[in-house]
Image (tube, rainbow, N blue to C red):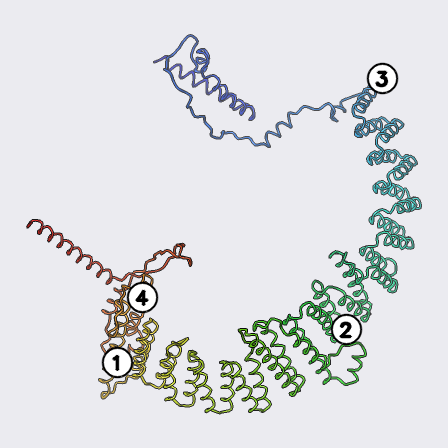
């Protein structure tokens, strides 16, 4: 045991010593040593016993048998190291420990040449290196430039020129060689040599702008302005890009030679005649050349002549950006004229733009600009005229493409009528002399004949397909034509002719359809009613009646004609005629509930309640009505208004015989509750009537509760007034619907019982009447159903099963109890049958 303890102690000391040494090492070496230790430990598994002894700290010659241990499943420690090293630390340490290169400046500074022999030896060695580099890669210009730089540092200028010439022999098109060659000559103040080099460069490479710029810059820095100008002139002969011309222009500006500036600009717009250069020329003229208005206007006129908008649009070879530039040029020209108080010139430019530019993309923008101009200088009629002409051309183009586009016709007609009304207003406000001057100044005036001609053109475009849907927009052209003649032109004779022509047209079309045995009718009741209203406005009552009588015959007693006829007769006070019309209307269309209702309301308005009641009785006895609930509601409201409460109850019972919908029950209950509220409000403490009123109130409460019970029984078991419904024949969703209505009814019942305890008019009677119904409220609340969600499968229209639909169902406790009782009884019967069979078997 002592030997083992000593061995463990030595092993612990050795590990502590290794850890202390590792903490003193740099961070990178420590990380490398840790990785090396891990690798060596893995490699040493299966080594000889001596290595195992050294690893375990055993003395040589001693062995211990620990048994065979399987170390293959040993898990490595992959936790993060305690000492973390960032990438920045690694790079910083590598930079501090790098070795200096042979070509570094520090090594060259350390090179000390003490005599001429060492200098020659150094020059020879370096020249040999550069020559070798050139020999290896003859076409690499960088070797020549390095060689030239070395010779320049040795002040061997002839050698430098020789090297550059050799480089030019290899590739004279390399701009860098020319630049370095000329910079060398300038740096060493060989100006004539540099001038010769620049001259050779621009002669051989005239399209390289950098060489020209450098050449001119050198001459300008030397003060040779004349020579620099000559170089610019040589350069301009090659027609360089626009920047070069502008550079020449700024050069002349710096030296205040404005006459030559104009020559340069003229040459620029001759070689590059784009809009930007023209605007640049105009801007330069304004800023530097005296801002002569006539000269600037001439430049604008030359530009717009060159870029004629009409020719550009006709060519169809322009892009959108080019059109934008041309429009911008015209707008700047107009702005220039506005700035110089030449409003007529500016208006002319805008008119030209509005006439030539496509309206879809630029019309609104140009109209806004022109409108701002007109607001500034005050000529509203001019802009209105331009807008009118512009839209007129557009409408005419659309109508020419599609004459049956009646919306376009109507918009066109509305615009012309509005413009005609404005002209009429101007004639009222202005003198004839002013109107004549407007016409003389090319102001367009719409005449009455122009509007009529346009209407005649529109109505002549009859739809080719003889179907009513194609005439629905066409009829409004006739209507507007007649209204225009009556209200604007003030010509009733022509208006009557328009109505007559329209009716004759549609009558002839209907006859054509009948002759061709085609199904359909193209008649419109609106035109007949408008014609009759027109005759009434002109005090021709008989003519209006004849028109409506004819319309009833032709249109097969259409409801709209009847209603208009009735409306007219009511205004005229001819009640007997109104009743006759209502009778004809109801005979022709007895299913329309609104006709019955209006007839009854008319009689009520005339205080003929018996007639109204008989009308309602006839209505509810009809076999089919489109909205029967409306007529029942009106009938009941009338009886309530007359305070015939017993009749109201009978009506509700009759209605319940036809339909037992929840809304009918709730309406009936609401009626009884309103009577109860009225009784409670009218209750007084007179000893004579007190007992009678108490009795009436209690009876009314019992009536309401009995209604709730009857409705509940109906929705539960389907029984009401000796009428039984077989609920077994109903499907599942119908039963769910009945349970939902029963739940809503129960909520209304609870709210009624609670209102007896909470509402003010019942609180006054709480001490007088026995209104303590808390037990009933609790009993009703205990009957509240449980709301559950269920799913059912949906079937598609073709009968195939679809997805699933979620719906809400209600479970009542009494129904569940009945089901449970029935189930228990069935089980008892089953047991009895089983016992009976056993007894029979025993007897046998």
Among the 4 quarters of the image, the one containing residue 530: bottom right
Q: Position of residue 235 (x, y in %)?
A: 89, 45
- Label 3 neighbour load within 10 Å: few <14, some 14-19, many 20+: few
Q: Upstream in the sequence, badge 2 or badge 1?
A: 2
Give the camera-side residue of 246 and 711.
711
Cα separation, mark 3 vs mark 2, equals 94 Å
Q: Can you tell which of label 4 and label 3 is closer to the viewer? A: 4
Query: Disc 2 designates what residue?
Result: 377
Give the residue at x 29% y 62%.
785
Query: Disc 1 designates what residue?
Result: 697
Give the residue at x 71% y 72%.
392
Q: Upstream in the sequence, badge 3 or badge 2?
A: 3
Among the 4 quarters of the image, the one containing residue 446: bottom right
Query: Which disc, if any, is residue 117?
Result: 3
Cα separation, mark 4 vs mark 2, equals 78 Å
Among the 4 quarters of the image, the one containing residue 220: top right
Q: Upstream in the sequence, badge 1 or badge 4?
A: 1
Q: Can you tell which of label 1 and label 4 is closer to the viewer? A: 4
Q: Do the residues bearing badges 1 and 3 touch, measured as CB atoms within 8 Å?
A: no
- Label 2 neighbour load within 10 Å: few <14, some 14-19, many 20+: few
Give the residue at x 88% y 47%.
236
Query: Disc 4 designates what residue?
Result: 738
Q: Position of residue 539 (x, y in %)?
A: 58, 91
Number of residue marks: 4
Give the camera-side residue of 465 and 345.
465
Would residue 289 be seen by someone viewing this image from the given angle? yes
Q: Upstream in the sequence, badge 4 or badge 3?
A: 3
């Amino acid at each position: 045991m002592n030997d083992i303890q000593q061995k463990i102690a030595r092993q612990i000391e050795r590990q502590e010593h290794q850890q202390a040494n590792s903490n003193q090492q740099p961070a990178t070496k420590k990380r490398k040593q840790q990785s090396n230790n891990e690798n060596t430990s893995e490699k040493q598994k299966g080594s000889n016993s001596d290595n195992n002894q050294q690893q375990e700290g055993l003395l040589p010659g001693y062995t211990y048998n620990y048994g065979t241990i399987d170390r293959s499943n040993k898990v490595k420690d992959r936790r993060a190291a305690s000492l973390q090293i960032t990438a920045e630390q690694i790079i910083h340490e590598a930079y501090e420990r790098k070795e200096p290169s042979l070509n570094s400046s520090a090594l060259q500074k350390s090179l000390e040449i003490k005599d001429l022999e060492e200098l020659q030896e150094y020059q020879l060695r370096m020249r040999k290196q550069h020559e070798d580099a050139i020999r290896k890669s003859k076409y690499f210009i960088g070797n020549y430039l390095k060689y030239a730089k070395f010779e320049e540092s040795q002040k061997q200028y002839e050698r430098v020129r020789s090297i550059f010439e050799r480089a030019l022999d290899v590739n004279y098109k390399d701009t860098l060689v020319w630049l370095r060659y000329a910079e060398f000559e300038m740096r060493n103040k060989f100006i004539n040599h540099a001038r010769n080099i620049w001259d050779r460069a621009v002669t051989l490479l005239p399209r390289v702008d950098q060489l020209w710029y450098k050449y001119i810059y050198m001459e300008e820095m030397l003060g040779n302005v004349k020579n620099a100008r000559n170089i610019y002139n040589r350069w301009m002969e090659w027609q360089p890009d626009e920047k070069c011309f502008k550079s020449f222009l700024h050069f002349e500006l710096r030296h205040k030679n404005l006459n030559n500036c104009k020559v340069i600009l003229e040459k620029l717009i001759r070689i590059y005649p784009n809009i930007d250069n023209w605007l640049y020329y105009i801007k330069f003229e304004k800023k530097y050349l005296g801002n002569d208005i006539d000269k600037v206007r001439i430049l604008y006129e030359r530009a717009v002549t060159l870029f004629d908008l009409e020719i550009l649009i006709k060519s169809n070879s322009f892009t959108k950006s080019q059109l934008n530039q041309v429009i911008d040029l015209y707008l700047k020209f107009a702005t220039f004229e506005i700035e110089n108080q030449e409003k007529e010139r500016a208006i002319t430019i805008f008119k030209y733009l509005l006439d030539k530019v496509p309206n879809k993309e630029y019309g609104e923008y140009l109209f806004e600009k022109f409108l701002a101009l007109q607001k500034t200088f005050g000529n509203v009629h001019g802009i209105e005229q331009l807008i009118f002409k512009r839209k007129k051309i557009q409408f005419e183009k659309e109508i020419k493409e599609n004459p049956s586009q009646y919306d376009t016709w109507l918009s066109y007609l509305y615009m012309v009528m509005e413009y005609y009304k404005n002209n009429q207003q101007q004639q009222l406000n202005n003198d004839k002399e002013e109107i004549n001057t407007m016409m003389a100044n090319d102001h367009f005036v719409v005449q009455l004949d122009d509007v009529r001609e346009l209407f005649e053109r529109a109505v002549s475009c009859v739809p080719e397909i003889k179907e009513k849907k194609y005439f629905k927009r066409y009829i409004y052209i006739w209507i507007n034509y007649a209204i225009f003649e009556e209200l604007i032109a003030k010509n009733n004779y022509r208006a009557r002719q328009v109505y007559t022509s329209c009716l004759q047209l549609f009558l002839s079309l209907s006859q054509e359809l009948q002759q061709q045995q085609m199904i359909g009718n193209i008649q419109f009741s609106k035109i007949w009613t408008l014609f009759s209203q027109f005759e009434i406005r002109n005090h021709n009552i008989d003519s209006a009646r004849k028109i409506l009588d004819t319309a009833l015959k032709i249109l097969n007693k259409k409801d709209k004609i009847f209603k208009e006829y009735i409306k007219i007769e009511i205004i005229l006070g001819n009640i007997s005629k109104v009743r006759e019309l209502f009778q004809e209307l109801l005979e022709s269309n007895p299913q329309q509930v609104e006709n019955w209702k209006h007839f009854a309301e008319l009689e009520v308005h005339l205080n003929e309640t018996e007639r109204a009641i008989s009308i309602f009785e006839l209505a509810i006895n009809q076999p089919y009505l489109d909205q029967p609930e409306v007529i029942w509601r009106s009938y009941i409201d009338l009886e309530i208004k007359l305070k015939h409460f017993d009749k109201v109850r009978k009506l509700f019972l009759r209605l319940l015989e036809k339909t037992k919908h929840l809304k009918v029950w709730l309406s009936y209950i609401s009626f009884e509750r309103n009577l109860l509220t009225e009784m409670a409000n009218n209750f007084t403490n007179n000893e004579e009537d007190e007992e009678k009123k108490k009795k009436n109130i209690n009876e009314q409460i019992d009536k309401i509760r009995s209604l709730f019970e009857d409705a509940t029984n109906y929705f539960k078991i389907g029984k009401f007034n000796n009428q039984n419904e077989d609920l077994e024949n109903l499907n599942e969703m119908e039963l769910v619907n009945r349970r939902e209505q029963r739940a809503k009814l129960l909520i209304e019942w609870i709210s009624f019982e609670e209102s007896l305890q909470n509402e003010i008019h019942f609180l006054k009677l709480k001490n007088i009447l026995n209104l303590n119904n808390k037990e009933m409220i609790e009993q009703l609340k205990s009957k509240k159903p449980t709301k559950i969600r269920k799913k059912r499968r949906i079937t598609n229209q073709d009968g195939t099963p679809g997805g699933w639909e979620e719906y809400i169902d209600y479970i009542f406790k009494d129904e569940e109890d009945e089901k449970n009782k029935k189930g228990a009884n069935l089980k008892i019967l089953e047991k009895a049958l089983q016992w009976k069979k056993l007894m029979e078997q025993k007897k046998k």
